[in-house]
Image (tube, rainbow, N blue to C red):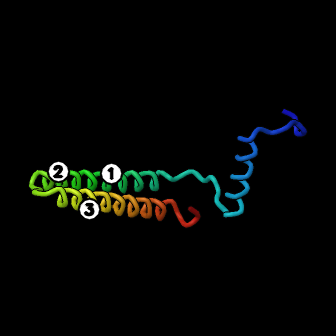
Amino acid sequence: MSDDAPKSAFELAMERLRRKDKEASRDDRPLTDEQKAAIAEVREWYKAKVAECEILHQAALRKARSHEEIERLNKNLRSDNERLANDRDRKIAQIRGPET
């Protein structure tokens, strides 16, 4: 493709994203083996915590006596899952380094 040929919307969007990343001083450095292992460990730990919350949630649902109690339990599960996901993402960002 020559330089004077029109670019597709995809190519233009990719150029904008590369410029934006460059301005934010992000580079495409690959993760080290240690970083990959640490990220995998964090993901596994949080996956186990989510599974634990789900098991406890199911047990609590079996004991629930009212619709309001079920709604409260479901709301608590959603907020716990959101909190765990945010914590997980924050830890992964710390492992990746200050540039992300």
- Residue 44, labelled with which disc? 1
Q: CA distance from mark 1 to mark 2?
A: 21 Å
Q: Which residue sits furthest front?
A: 67
Cβ atoms at labels 1 and 2 below 8 Å apart? no
Q: Quadrant of the C terminus?
A: bottom right
Camera-side residue of 16 and 98: 16
Query: What residue sits right under mark 3 in the picture?
Result: 76
Q: Which residue sits furthest right?
A: 4
User: Is label 1 or label 3 in front?
Assistant: 3
Query: What residue sits right under mark 2 in the picture?
Result: 58
Query: Callout 2 environment at 10 Å: few (<14), some (14 to 19), or many (20+)?
Result: some
Q: Position of residue 9 (x, y in %)?
A: 74, 41
Where is residue 90, by image quadrant? bottom left
Query: Who comes first in sequence, dot 1 or dot 3?
Result: 1
Report the residue at 71% width, 41% height from top.
10
Report the residue at 15% width, 53% height from top.
61
Cβ atoms at labels 3 and 2 below 8 Å apart? no
Q: CA distance from mark 1 to mark 3?
A: 22 Å
Where is residue 80, by image quadrant? bottom left
